[in-house]
Image: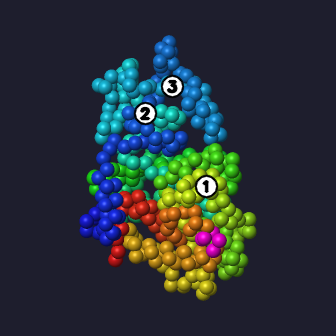
């Protein structure tokens, strides 16, 4: 990580970073489903078998799991394998790693490693308790491109960004890995856009990050992506949006086409792309209204201090506005940048300043509202594809070139004290 050679921050930032680096486990677990916090010793297990005639090991209806499923609108389950409480199992039958109970052998000498949250009985990520868990909420209006952004972000992090900061990112399970790979294959190999996220209960994407520096505990990142239509549905947010107020970081995506002042200009100057310039866009401020109603208004001073990256998407569309008053033709947003070994604060401050200025002109109401209700913010511009698709397809002759997609996430890592801040 280059803690001593690369760090250029002030004393407070340095002290906070060292504290995060040398934090010791076991760690408190945050359930990525019900968001309850508990100690590692409180986990329970799902038996890997059942035994007829034994009341403890017969199949049974899991009331806690079904209660959770009903709450989020999922179907309830019939009888399934029973739950094992570890305190009833001898210590010699338990397996611990880094002080965390990860497996046990039951009274039939059959092993199970399926750990469950004691409050909702959903299965926990395999790394829960061995490092901190961080919840990242990706929010934004319909058609802003959240699913495409998440797919290209994970692609960039796995392929090259993490290596530059001396870390590695892998999917939390083979199931997550298969889903992510399928989406990346559609975009990067088949040149096909992803279908819009359906308005239903969305499971989180769980990723594990490990630094080469063994003094830093591995981090479990839990990404939530709410469908845009759900963001402005009060009932949906109340049922499916609890993760937002429990977030450790927020990525707030904003589409330039959501800004009335830009919509016609972008439509005219980009008409040769023949992309989607529909006028059925929600305004960026609409999303803040629902965030305010459902969680910000309940915070102290009606303001949240959850680090929030405000990300202008589809930045490739802005290139033809460079002759306008909104953005300079020499803007760094049109060039990729590699943050190597530390987060370059000079580069970040340049981008942050440009996008703050851009939004002040393009949508001053949104910018003012963000400054009022969000206490810790960073402003960014990204292009998930580097081009504008047509009819959900990407021109096969066009090279897909994600632009600065990793920067908002790296900034969140810096805010969480897991990445050095430096200047060049």
Instruction: Look at the picture and state if 107 lies above or below 307.
Output: above
Q: Which residue is mark 1?
A: 297
Mark 1 lies on a secondary structure that is helix
Disc 1 and disc 2: Cα gap in Å?
33 Å
Q: Which residue is mark 3?
A: 81
Residue 330 included in the magenta stretch of the image: no
User: Which segment did they paint magenta?
Assistant: 364-368
Nearer the camera: disc 1 or disc 2: 1
Mark 3 lies on a secondary structure that is loop
Instruction: Look at the picture and state if 272 lies above or below 10.
Output: below
Q: Residue at x 64, y 73 (%)?
A: 363
Based on the displayed image, in which of its 4 quarters is residue 112 positioned? top left
Instruction: State the image coordinates of residue 302 (x, y, percent, origin top left).
Output: 58, 58
Q: Mark 1 and mark 2 in contact? Answer it, CB < 8 Å.
A: no
Residue sitting at the far bottom? 323
| Residue 10 placement, left or right of 355 | left
Instruction: Look at the picture and state if 333 lies above or below 155.
Output: below
Q: Which residue is mark 2?
A: 43
Q: Residue at x 54, y 84 (%)?
A: 328
Mark 2 lies on a secondary structure that is loop
Q: Earlier in the sequence, mark 2 or mark 3?
A: 2
């Amino acid at each position: 990580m280059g803690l001593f050679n690369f760090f250029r921050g002030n004393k407070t930032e340095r002290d906070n970073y060292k504290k995060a680096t040398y934090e010791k486990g076991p760690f408190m677990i945050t359930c990525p489903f019900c968001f309850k916090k508990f100690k590692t010793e409180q986990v329970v297990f799902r038996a890997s078998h059942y035994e007829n005639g034994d009341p403890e090991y017969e199949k049974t209806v899991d009331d806690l799991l079904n209660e959770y499923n009903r709450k989020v609108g999922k179907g309830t389950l019939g009888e399934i394998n029973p739950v094992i409480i570890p305190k009833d199992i001898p210590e010699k039958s338990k397996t611990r790693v880094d002080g965390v109970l990860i497996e046990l052998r039951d009274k039939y000498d059959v092993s199970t490693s399926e750990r469950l949250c004691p409050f909702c009985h959903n299965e926990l990520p395999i790394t829960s308790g061995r490092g901190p868990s961080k919840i990242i909420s990706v929010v934004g209006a319909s058609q802003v491109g959240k699913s495409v952004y998440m797919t290209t972000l994970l692609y960039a992090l796995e392929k090259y960004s993490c290596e530059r900061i001396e870390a590695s990112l892998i999917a939390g399970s083979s199931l997550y890995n298969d889903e992510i790979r399928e989406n990346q294959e559609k975009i990067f190999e088949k040149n096909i856009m992803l279908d819009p996220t359906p308005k239903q209960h969305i499971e989180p994407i769980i990723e594990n990050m490990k630094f080469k520096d063994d003094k830093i505990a591995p981090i479990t990142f839990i990404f939530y992506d709410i469908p845009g239509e759900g963001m402005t549905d009060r009932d949906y947010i109340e049922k499916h949006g609890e993760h937002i107020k429990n977030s450790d970081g927020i990525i707030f995506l904003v589409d330039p086409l959501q800004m009335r002042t830009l919509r016609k200009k972008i439509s005219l100057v980009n008409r040769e792309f023949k992309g989607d310039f529909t006028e059925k866009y929600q305004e960026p401020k609409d999303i803040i209204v629902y965030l305010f109603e459902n969680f910000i208004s309940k915070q102290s001073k009606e303001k949240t201090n959850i680090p929030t990256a405000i990300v202008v998407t589809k930045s490739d569309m802005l290139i033809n506005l460079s002759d306008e008053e909104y953005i300079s033709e020499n803007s760094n947003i049109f060039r990729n940048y590699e943050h190597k070994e530390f987060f370059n604060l000079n580069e970040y401050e340049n981008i942050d300043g440009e996008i703050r200025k851009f939004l002040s002109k393009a949508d001053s109401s949104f910018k003012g509202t963000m400054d009022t209700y969000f206490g810790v913010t960073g402003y960014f511009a990204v292009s998930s594809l580097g081009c504008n698709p047509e009819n959900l397809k990407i021109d096969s002759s066009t090279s897909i070139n994600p632009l600065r997609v990793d920067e908002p996430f790296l900034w969140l890592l810096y805010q969480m004290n897991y990445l050095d801040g430096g200047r060049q």
